[in-house]
Amino acid sequence: MSEMPPSPFAPPRTENFTAVEGPGGEVPHTAIEALRKTRPWVIFLSILSFLGAGLLLVMGVFVGLLGSMGSIPDTPGMPRGVMGAIGIFYFLAGGLYIYPGVRLLQYGLSIGRLVQDRQPASLTRALELQMRFWRFMGIATIAGMALYFVGIVVFAVLAASGVLKP
């Protein structure tokens, strides 16, 4: 009788890993390598987040100031002061981009620390920072979806009431 292949749903066996022994225990070499390979992308996305935040902050100040001074003509049919509000929105969005950039940078640095010392505590710290990033992104996504819904409802009410004219 032939032997059945292992189930794809079975947990991995410890003999599949080459572990690195440290004072706090073992950290699988494959785990360190997987995180090491993602580190450049984590740092890259962190830098892009900071650049995006800076761009949004500058745009927010620029559009807000020009809109409030009346330098940007209002679009016909659009209530006065909308450009200033858009500038404030850009500024706030830029501020929100900073937090995930910081979290990604901390995560990337903790991966570097893990690669250097290969300690279970460093692996735990890296995974905790990754969890905090994804938790923030999940909350931000839910908040964004709620804002989209509110925006659509407000736009529909304004359009139906005749405030927004084509």
Image (cartoon, rainbow, N blue to C red):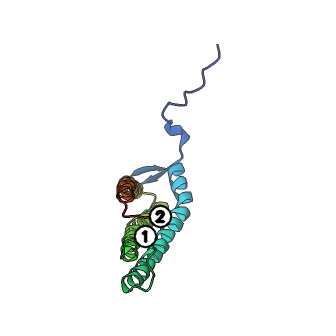
Give the distance between the C-alpha atoms of the residues marked 2 and 1, in whole angstroms: 7 Å
Q: Amino acid at mark 1?
A: Gly
- Mark 2 and mark 1 in contact? Answer it, CB < 8 Å: yes
User: What residue is rendered at 41% in x and 58% in y?
Assistant: 126
User: In the rendering, at what x and y percent does residue 34 appear?
Assistant: 54, 53
User: In the rendering, at what x and y percent does residue 127 appear?
Assistant: 41, 54
Left or right position of 33 against 159: right
Disc 1 on helix, strand or loop? loop
Badge number at residue 132 = none
User: In the rendering, at what x and y percent does residue 136 appear?
Assistant: 36, 57
Give residue 8's quadrant in the image. top right
Q: Amino acid at mark 2?
A: Pro
Specify whether residue 121 is in view. no
Q: Earlier in the sequence, mark 2 or mark 1?
A: 1
Badge number at residue 166 = 2
In the displayed orientation, state which residue is furthest to the top: 1
Badge number at residue 77 = 1
Q: Is residue 109 above or below residue 138?
A: below
